[in-house]
Image (spheres, coloured by chain):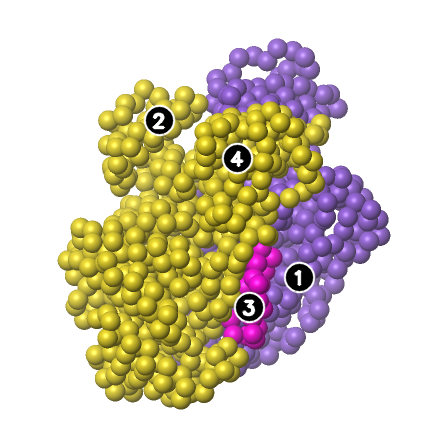
Chain colours: A yellow, B purple
């Protein structure tokens, strides 16, 4: 792996935790963001955009924690320094101040500020003239540059901006001290040839362009994010802004794995390199999918379950006569685990720990003990534990928020005769146990209602997905839920459309019994909701154990 | 909508039922293929590749049924004829004969024959010299052309074929009578600029190239299928081979919706048109996802749940100041249903039928009665029935195979105390009822084991996914399962790698109780397996009602 300072080195700027996390339902807590940031650093990304600190105090805190820990960690293999930690700011002093505060603890902090430059955004969103925009660029980039050495500037909706005006904006930003200039195709509108021309044109026409690194940031609304990003790099950009699995608002951002593997697989074509250790791609993809609740479709390039022809689950009588006839990458190159059968119920703690370490998870003693306990519990119920099961156990554990209420027991009766009933026992913040039974339209509904009834929440279930982790009829089930709370206050600002959104919360649970997994996932989401809502919302149970529940309408 | 005969008209060649159906687990029965073909015709595709008739007698029959019905249907709006029905054949008389037989009933039949042309395929797969390949192209295209007016030829792995040899191959195919020449990037290896150059080079260098339509067929291994397809069209290709949702082997094929919407959204850039009525895209996507069991990720371009910013589930306090600031397409343009609240338990059959018709489903009287019955049953359990619920009900019904065993009752007890137990009652082919109880690692496992025990199957569960259809804690759950049978005979040949695969079977079930939905889905898959396995496999129950089950190992 080359260092990222050569003329052919592409800096990988990961915005999974900022633009990715902005997508509906991908909201993460601070611990989850830290876990993802650790994985990104291990993967070898050069810059981590850790969040938009002005969105909320929690967002600021999360960026600060990442700056402290990951911004000062041991450099990943092939790197000389820990990753740069970056925060996003609108072109406003308040936003920039918050970023400065949040990224300060990092060894290499960066402020990333932006303003929209396209006519439609100037007219309808900003209500500003070209000159006003230029003045804002100059003053805010200079303000940031006086306080931080590393300043990135983005011309939002650059893809739809008049080229001449874009040149003026870029020139102003460089003159004012920005050392990275990002050109986003914010709405996923441009074609690769157009986007390449914009980058090449900027290289040719902007005075002082050599003082800055050009960056590209593409969206996938027409399925062209990867092609546009690669076209930008070919035309001279040397930073790519990407997310794991291509998550992000609407159709998402450019997928890190696609750009990195295109550059690697087509080495002679691009003559570029990145500092990414691709063998961590598969694992990082799974972590982000679990933590964000954003599923990866089986036919997703590089990281989908079907991406490699001979992946588990595909039975074939023969073997391909020559692997490369239908395969341009080897699954091992992105860390797709090939060995399936791993451990059984008689495996010890040592074998368990060393297998996890082989899979790239080095847990603390406490986390290892908890994971081992869950492993033994699973091994009692499932004959063979595969790598996929282990990854699910560990990532599920990493994805868990602080437990305010914990699930102490669940009992369900259901079926086609109707009247599905669930009895739930929770242990609350004060150590008290609460029990409640509820009838629902199905066992999951019944269990969720019983939890709502104990906790006193009124949640909207926005998403509910179950997947089997591995093959086999005794497979571990992974449940993802996303909930909202119609009554909660607006707490979080979207940096682009400036809409103050009602937050939604994602929860994740794993068990061989999918009703138990569902209850765990829902409770995890409810715990996040309670933690975020704080004192404004009912966090104390309304009923003591054994009390009759007060009547509630059937549907939340 | 223009007719597709102008110089700027792009023919949309849909291969969802051939290349899409080849992807692991997407196997469909004849009725399901017919349903998809009907939807494709309504969408306005120009050519339907209905299958690979030489794969198995069932595959031939499915192509024939599609040729009969859809190949002679009323032309879709904007079209003068029903779609061309096409079948795939290796460059071999036996394969071509089977295609001829299968597509014959269509008003406009097409034979599509192919041979690999790249050095790696010639050496390791075909073990043929360049001259031998050329001779095969000449003789087999001529053989097909003598028997069918419309012949398409594909140079497999054209993307990695020496350009000069590719020119010779294409010239030979045209001389021998092929009127469509398809250039596939079989392994998803080329970059858009390279792929565009191949197409432009062929236009320039091949004698007689104007006598044929050039076609492009791209794979998404590096996330570039759409970009490559568009580059090919810009360079002069006038047929695009695509699948709904981009399904297909490995990372899949080019997604129809992305190519069509790029051409439509960027009309001035491409100056091309297609005969697709984009308002049917969303509905067709949902049908294919349900029938194939291939999930669509939320951040999928055009058809993902998050693709449009203001889709259901995204709560926002404000409204965008101007819709186009962040949206380059309107959700209505691809038929994303905007109205959510539709029907309740007091809605009558007439209102139900007319709403289905608005959604584009015109059911037969019998199918309508069955759907209405399910609707009333659902309305008893769920307060409000949304368009999404209706689509799920109807597509689920369409996706059902012939019932050999039907679910007459299910009763489940489970929870964190362990010993999940399911009691299942099935009615078998002879009208007899069978009951069996089983213990599993979870309630789903227990229900599947009880079904296995009655039917006498030994299935491998390869995939298990549940999704909530709509928001709300009382949502309808949609379960997809995919099973294989380690003991079944190999029955189906893959046209490309010539591997005879063990078939896998997908089943689909919908219910507010996800355990009931799971049992329905599993039984649907088992019914398909029994139907395909035929007399070679135990289709008769081993136990009469009330008999003690024979001991079985815990895991299938």
Pointers 3 and 4 within a single chain? no
Tell me the element at label 4.
helix
Give the quarter of the image for residue A543. Answer: top right
Q: Which residue is mark 3?
A: B260
Tell me the element at label 2.
helix
Q: Which chain does the numbered disc 3 sit on?
A: B
Q: Which residue is mark 1?
A: B338
Residue B91 placed where, x, y %? Answer: 47, 55
- Position of the C terminus of chain A by quadrant: top right
Give the quarter of the image for residue B272. Answer: bottom right
Closer to the observer: label 3 or label 4? 4
Q: Is residue B489 among what the camera can see?
A: no
- Position of the N terminus of chain A by quadrant: bottom left
Q: Which residue is mark 4?
A: A519
- C-alpha gap between disc 4 and disc 2: 20 Å
Tell me the element at label 1.
loop
- C-alpha gap between disc 3 and disc 4: 42 Å
Residue B368 placed where, x, y %? Answer: 79, 47
Q: Nearer the viewer, residue B19 or A246?
A: A246
Q: Quick check: A278 left or right of A539?
A: left
- Asked whether disc 2 touches disc 1, contact meaning CB atoms under 8 Å apart, the reply is no
- C-alpha gap between disc 2 and disc 1: 47 Å
Q: Which residue is mark 2?
A: A373
């Amino acid at each position: 792996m080359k260092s990222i300072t050569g003329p052919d080195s592409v800096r990988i700027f990961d915005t999974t935790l900022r633009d990715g996390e902005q997508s509906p339902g991908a909201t993460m807590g601070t611990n989850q963001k830290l876990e993802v940031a650790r994985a990104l650093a291990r993967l070898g990304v050069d810059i981590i955009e850790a969040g938009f600190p002005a969105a909320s105090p929690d967002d600021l805190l999360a960026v600060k924690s990442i700056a402290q820990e990951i911004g000062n960690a041991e450099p990943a293999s092939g790197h000389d320094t820990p990753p740069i930690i970056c925060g996003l700011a609108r072109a406003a002093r308040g936003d920039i101040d918050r970023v400065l505060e949040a990224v300060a603890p990092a060894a290499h902090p960066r402020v990333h500020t932006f303003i929209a430059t396209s006519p439609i955004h100037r007219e309808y969103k900003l209500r500003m003239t070209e000159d006003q925009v230029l003045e804002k660029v100059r003053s805010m980039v200079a303000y940031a540059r006086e306080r931080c050495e590393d300043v990135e500037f983005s011309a939002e909706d650059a893809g739809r901006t008049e080229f001449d005006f874009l040149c003026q904006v870029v020139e102003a930003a460089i003159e004012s001290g920005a050392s990275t200039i990002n050109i986003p195709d914010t709405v996923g509108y441009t074609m690769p040839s157009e986007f390449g021309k914009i980058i090449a044109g900027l290289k040719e026409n902007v005075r002082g362009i050599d003082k800055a690194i050009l960056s590209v940031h593409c969206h996938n609304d027409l399925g062209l994010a990867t092609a546009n990003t690669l076209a930008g790099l070919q035309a001279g950009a040397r930073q790519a802004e990407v997310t794991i699995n291509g998550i992000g608002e609407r159709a998402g951002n450019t997928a890190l794995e696609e750009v990195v593997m295109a550059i690697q697989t087509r080495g002679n074509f691009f003559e570029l390199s990145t500092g990414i250790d691709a063998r961590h791609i598969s694992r990082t993809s799974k972590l982000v999918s679990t933590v964000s609740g954003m599923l990866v479709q089986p036919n997703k390039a590089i990281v989908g379950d079907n991406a490699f022809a001979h992946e588990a689950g595909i039975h074939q009588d023969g073997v391909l006569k020559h692997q490369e006839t239908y395969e341009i990458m080897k699954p091992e190159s992105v860390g797709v685990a090939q060995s399936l059968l791993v451990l059984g119920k008689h495996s010890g703690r040592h074998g368990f720990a060393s297998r996890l370490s082989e899979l790239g998870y080095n847990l603390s003693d406490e986390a290892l003990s908890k994971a081992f306990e869950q492993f033994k519990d699973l091994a009692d119920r499932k004959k063979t534990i595969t790598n996929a099961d282990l990854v699910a156990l560990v990532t599920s554990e990493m994805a868990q928020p602080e437990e305010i209420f914990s699930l102490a027991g669940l009992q369900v009766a259901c079926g086609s005769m109707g009247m599905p009933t669930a009895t739930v026992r929770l242990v609350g913040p004060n150590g008290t146990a609460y029990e409640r039974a509820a009838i629902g339209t199905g066992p999951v509904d019944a269990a969720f209602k019983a939890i709502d009834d104990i906790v006193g929440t009124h949640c909207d279930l926005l998403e509910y997905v179950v997947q089997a982790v591995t093959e086999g009829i005794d497979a571990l089930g992974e449940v993802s839920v996303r909930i909202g709370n119609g009554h909660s206050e607006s707490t979080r600002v979207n940096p682009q459309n400036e809409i103050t959104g009602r937050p939604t919360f994602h929860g994740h649970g794993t068990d061989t019994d999918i009703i138990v997994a569902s209850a765990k996932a829902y409770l995890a989401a409810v715990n996040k909701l309670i933690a975020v809502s704080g004192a404004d919302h009912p966090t104390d149970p309304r009923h003591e154990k054994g009390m009759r529940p007060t009547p509630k309408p059937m549907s939340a």
